[in-house]
Amino acid sequence: MMNQKRVEDKLAELNLTLPQALSPIGAYVPFKIEGETLWLSGVIPVIDGKPYCKGRVGESVNLELAIECARITTLNALSWVKEAIGSLDRIDQVLRLQGFVASAGDFFDQPKVLNGASDLLVELFGDAGKHTRIAVGVCSLPLNVPVEIDFVFKTKKS
């Protein structure tokens, strides 16, 4: 069996780094583990404690910026994963993403926005990064960010 490349090595090859795990901005915990399933609370695109951008997609936020927000959100989520289970290499599968996109009334490309997260997960985890997903347009999100995603992972036994 060929050695698989470590996920953090793949991040480095993509010139990406995991940020410091964010503290919750409300009365919730960032993650829960039940058996081999790791559930993350909703994650938003924050860098250094501040929203990467604000607004609704199709108004003040264009599609490309929203896709970047989904990628940043995914990196923030992976920092919680690392905090929860110690290593990204303990992810066996990405099971589900549930994404919310703050959208103008005539914006209908929520799935394209979420592809920013989905594509990154497949780049990092290969076939194990393929997942089920829902992409929902909403009128607003916390801190006026354009994207919020929650994640469900299956972990490997340590």
Image (spheres, rainbow, N blue to C red):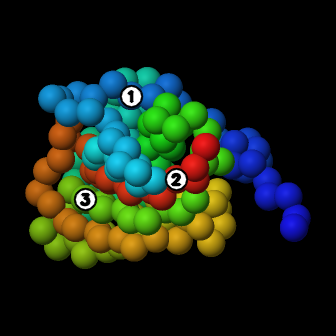
Residue 107 place in picture, x, y as percent: 23, 71
User: Residue placed at 79% from the left, 53% from the top?
Assistant: 5
Tell which circle, 1 or 2, labels the residue nearer the N-terminal end: 1
- The image's mark for residue 22 is 1
| Residue at the image position 37 percent from the left and 44 percent from the top | 33
On the image, numbered disc 2 is attached to which residue?
A: 155
Chain-order first, disc 1 or disc 3: 1
Q: Residue at x 52, y 53 (%)?
A: 155
Task: Name the one closer to the observer, 152 or 17.
Answer: 152
Residue 52 x, y percent position in the rendering: 38, 37
Label 3 environment density (alpha carbons within 10 Å; few <14, some 14–19, many ≥20): many
Q: Position of residue 42 (x, y in %)?
A: 28, 46
Position of the C terminus, as image quadrant, is top right
Q: Amino acid at mark 1?
A: Leu
Residue nearest the viewer, comparing 45 with 60: 45
| Marks 1/2: CA–CA distance | 21 Å
**Which residue lies under the disc numbered 3?**
100
Q: Residue at the location (69% across, 42% down)?
A: 8
Distance between the alpha carbons at the discs numbered 3 and 2: 24 Å
Does residue 76 lie above or below 36 as drawn? above
**Which amino acid type is marked by label 3?**
Phe
Relative horizontal placement of residue 94, taking residue 143 as reference (left or right): right
Element type at mark 3: strand
**What is the distance, in whole Å, between disc 1 and disc 3 at their CAs?**
19 Å
Q: Is residue 122 above or below residue 11?
A: below
Task: Indicate which disc residue 133 carries.
Answer: none
